[in-house]
Image (cartoon, helix red, strand yellow):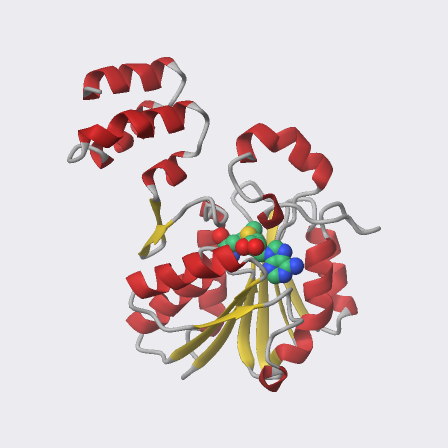
Amino acid sequence: MDASRARRDLVAAGVAPHEARWLLEEYAEDPSALADAVERRLSGEPLQYVLGHWPFRTLDLVVDSRALIPRPETEWLIDIAWARVHDRSTLRVLDLGCGSGAIGLALADEARRASVPLSLVAADRSRDALDLCALNAARAHLELTLVRSTWFDDVDAAWRGTFDLVVTNPPYVSRAQWLTLASELAFEPVEALVAGDTPDAEGFADLARIIASVREWLAPDGVLVAEHGADQGGAATRAALEAGFTRVNDYEDLAARPRVLVAST
Ligand SMILES: C[S@@+](CC[C@H](N)C(=O)[O-])C[C@H]1O[C@@H](n2cnc3c(N)ncnc32)[C@H](O)[C@@H]1O
């Protein structure tokens, strides 16, 4: 397929011109693979999966259907988390629900650039996600310990009370919401997106579980930084206070929607 026809087909089908350009640039050296890539994009597959890699902070991550595509709002979570811990002399970090490894690896790279020794544990229930995270760690020349676990269930008990920072971006879309977004999110693993409801908020079950049990894993001056849905700010703050955190902030995004819980004692 030649490039100008590919561009025409993509734009005619509603693909944004800049996306069409990126796709053509990606395959400029391999025109035989272009037709397949165009077909995948035209079938609705996200550009990130078609390209197979995507920038996240300082990293170029491999992204594929084994894990969620890292989102721009999660890049902002890194700023919030790093601001809270950057002045420590060493860091022990747990990335819970690591997926591609975006959060933990981006923090590890920040720490490397700042010459702060950081030890990273990345946990996920999905074997596929852990494999992808391992690949991204190797590409970035970053070390980590991978743990297959349903939240804290299989995290080594010896690590209780040791983490300076627990970061998490768990599933927080309700099933009802997911059904309305299904065509947009159809290519991403549903188990990375959808969480059960609680009496306090839809899609909040995983966050509720994490917030309720995270304190015992944090060092005495440890911090939890958790991304949540825009309508879950109240529930997140209440859950953190109920769990015994005394310093609780919820950060609002540029649209003034609460999105990131930061809790410590
Ligand atoms: C929203 S994705 C976030 C991925 C990555 N941290 C990011 O920000 O791009 C949530 C991740 O949590 C994992 N997950 C879902 N339920 C889980 C559970 N019960 N225990 C552990 N991990 C779980 C999923 O496999 C997925 O990788």
- Residue 21 shows up from this direction: no
Residue 137 percent across, percent down from the top left:
36, 64
Residue 230 in the figure: left or right of residue 99: right
Q: Residue at x 49, y 61 (%)?
A: 80
Residue 73 place in picture, x, y as percent: 49, 48
Report the quarter where the C terminus lies: bottom right
What residue is shown at x 61% (from left), y 31% (from top)? 181
Task: Mark yes or no: residue 103 visible.
Answer: yes
Task: Examine the image and state in which quarter residue 114 appears.
Answer: bottom left
Q: Looking at this view, is 226 or 246 the one in front?
A: 226
The quarter of the picture where the N terminus appears is top left
* Residue ranking furthest to the left: 29
Quarter location, residue 158: bottom right
Q: Is residue 200 left or right of residue 262?
A: right
Above or below for 156 versus 262: below
Point 36% across, 72% down: residue:
111
What residue is drawn where x is 29% and y is 68%? 141
Q: Is residue 114 above or below residue 18?
A: below
160 shown above or below 213: below
| Residue 159: % across, % down | 58, 83
Observer-nearest of 249 and 113: 113
- Residue at the bottom extreme of this rendering: 158
- Ligand 1: give its quadrant: bottom right
Left or right: residue 165 versus residue 132 is right
